[in-house]
Amino acid sequence: MTDYIIALGDNNLILGQRLGEWCGHGPALETDMALTNISLDLFGMTRSYFQYAAEVEGKGRTEDDIAFLRNERQYKNVQLVEQPNGNYADTIARQFFFDAWHYLFLEQLAKSSDSQLSAIAVKSIKEVKYHLRFSSQWVLRLGDGTAESHEKMQAAVNDLWMFTGELVTSSELEKAMATQGIGVDVSELKTAYYEKLESVLREATLEIPKKDWMQQGGKNGIHTEYLGHILSHMQYLQRAHPGAEW
């Protein structure tokens, strides 16, 4: 169960780190603050998961140990969240693809037989509802905007589409936790997930990519080249100054 809880936190941790890179670099002050606040929301969720994981594990590890003192193969986040920020359309496409899944996922996790996971989900879904509204509106604004914004948004959707399948493909761990009533079988979210994506993309006058092949591996610790670079920055302070706290 500890591994499952940590994996839930990993998605938020890595995406939060990516969004934090926008701080001070957003296209407008309001957008800059919005991305930073979403990043902070995700870090808050990460802390809730990691604190609970440390408690369940009972080996004296802290949330900081879990966040910063693992190697690349021990992170079980999906590959989508580690993709580079790119231009603003790339960031928005990545965020929308994750948010649409995240909201559906938390709806189901709120029904968990584990009271702590259920409580985390109930609290988090209020924030994720805003995340989804924010990213959806930006997909619409860019997709149905100028010729240039439409082109960039379509390119971002095309490039990142292959990472969406992993979100709704259940790992063996997820299946086991779902069977016990603790976790969520994410494969059951697939229909609702793609219906949401396609609804927003069509409204944004964007084409739905016709790609059947999906990139997999993150849930099993197999990542793209980008995660190692993220960890080198994220873990530097903790490794240089052991015991430093958030």
Image (cartoon, rainbow, N blue to C red):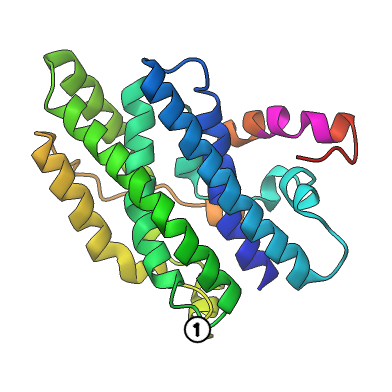
Asked whether the viewer can see residue 222, the reply is no
Q: Is residue 189 above or below residue 195?
A: below
Name the residue that disc number 1 marks. 181
Residue at the image position 53 percent from the left and 45 percent from the top: 42
Q: In the image, is 239 to the left or to the right of 42? A: right
Of 215 and 77, the residue lying toward us? 77
Regarding mark 1 in the picture, which secondary structure is present there?
loop
Q: Is residue 190 above or below residue 25?
A: below
Q: In the image, is 181 to the left or to the right of 195? A: right
Location of residue 87 (image quadrant): top left
Location of residue 110 (image quadrant): bottom left
Residue at the image position 78 percent from the left and 29 percent from the top: 236
Residue at the image position 38 percent from the left and 37 percent from the top: 94
Amino acid on which the number 1 mark rests in the picture: Gly
Give, as a single range, the part of the protein colored magenta. Answer: 231-238
Label count reads: 1
Q: Position of residue 67 (x, y in %)?
A: 72, 47
Q: Quadrant of the C terminus?
A: top right
Q: Position of residue 63 (x, y in %)?
A: 75, 53
Q: In the image, is 170 to the left or to the right of 75? A: left
Dominant SS type (magenta): helix
Asked whether the viewer can see residue 120, the reply is yes
Residue at the image position 63 percent from the left and 31 percent from the top: 230
- Graded by Cα atoms within 10 Å as few (under 14), some (14 to 19) or many (20 or more), the crowding at tag 1 reads some
Q: Is residue 110 above or below residue 83?
A: below
Q: Position of residue 112 (x, y in %)?
A: 49, 78
**Does the magenta segment cover residue 162?**
no
Q: Position of residue 51 (x, y in %)?
A: 71, 59
Q: Quadrant of the N terminus?
A: bottom right
